[in-house]
Image: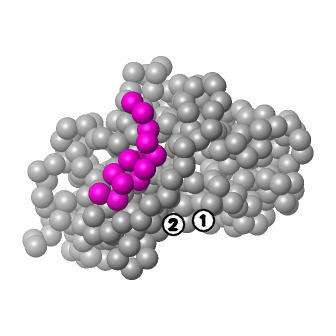
Amino acid sequence: MQAPQQLIVGTRGSALALVQADMTEKLLAKAFPNTEIIRNVIVTTGDRRTDVPLAEVAKVEGVLDKGVFTKELEIALENGEIDLAVHSLKDVPTVLPEGFEIVSVLERAPANDIIITKSTGGLDALKQGATVATSSVRRQKMLLHMRPDLKLIDIRGNVPTRLRKLAENPDLDGIILAEAGLVRLGYDALGEMKTAAGAVFGAMIEPAQFLPAAGQGAVGIEVRKGDDVTAECVRAICHEQTFTRVIAEREFLRLLDGGCHTPVGVATQLFGDSLLMEAIVFPEGEGGGAPLQAEVSGKASDPIKTAGILFNSLSIEE
């Protein structure tokens, strides 16, 4: 292919977003050494509205669910201000607006969730009635399923900010963060992490019980439909095994008609030609109720079909 003279990469401005943009830019520069790679940092609605809980941002701003972290990047794509947008894939709506597509992903980091506390011991060491902060409805539901005694509150801010808030707040006992973000920012996710307000300590929550969000740990690259040159460039850096897994996870979420505030966890693993999928879906709303759980396997060559098998196995009523 004829490589373009330049590619403009769009990204949010958080510390993690900039690391993920840098990862993308380095891969593109290696694949296309004669192409100039330019970065355009864009402030999204989700970054701007830190004054309200994340679950309320879309309602307040009139933005489509996960679009709080993608809308402005897609406007920039549409206007030709950028050629590609780099996202944390778990922040991307499962159904994109007309005219855009995710055509590539980078190699996935660990998809687990980490509980971070002020002393070692993880979730089991938290006292009865401890206060844990997370902005994720999925994490809130799974935490209460495992530890109904916990008090859960909302928290906003980037990764370093949340770590500092935990260390300095005497009324806060723990927070939940994705292992992928911690690792990419250079933290010891399963050990001691230093902040300006003191040290905090990370421990994994049992992955078999605490399933991640669809696409968690993956970096997705979005382009304009019809921009074949850019699409071909970013496909050249795609990690195919990760792409297979996230296609299945996002299709399952689409079948649920779910977004970033749908309390569902979904995990995938590849074993040769087989794709293993498992999911847990909690009832929405304030009421309780037992979650639905299922595990299936299918062909790795057809992740869409495997996602459909998983969805049907849950027998979810409309």
> From what the image shows, is residue 240 above or below residue 41?
below
Q: Which residue is mark 2?
A: 109
Q: Nearer the viewer, residue 96 or 197?
A: 96
The answer to whether the residue labelled 2 contacts the one labelled 1, judged by CB atoms less than 8 Å apart, is: yes
- Between disc 2 and disc 1, the foreground one is 2
Q: CA distance from mark 2 to mark 1?
A: 8 Å
- Name the quadrant containing residue 263: top right
Q: Nearer the viewer, residue 118 or 255?
A: 255
Q: Can you give x and y, in whole percent of width and height, for residue 96 in the image?
A: 28, 41
Query: Callout 2: helix, strand or loop?
Result: loop
Q: Can you give x and y, in whole percent of width and height, for residue 107 in the image?
A: 42, 69
Please, what is the three-letter code of the amino acid marked with disc 2?
Answer: Ala
Visual colour scheme:
one colour
Please, what is the three-letter code of the amino acid marked with disc 1?
Answer: Val
Principal secondary structure, stretch drawn in magenta: helix
Residue at x 76% of width, y 66% of height? 191
Q: Which residue is mark 1?
A: 183
Q: Can you give x and y, in whole percent of width and height, for residue 312 in the image?
A: 38, 47
Question: Label 1: how many residues lie within 10 Å, few (<14), some (14-19) or many (20+)?
Answer: some
Residue at x 24% of width, y 66% of height? 235
Quarter that holds the N terminus: bottom left
First to last magenta residue range: 305-318
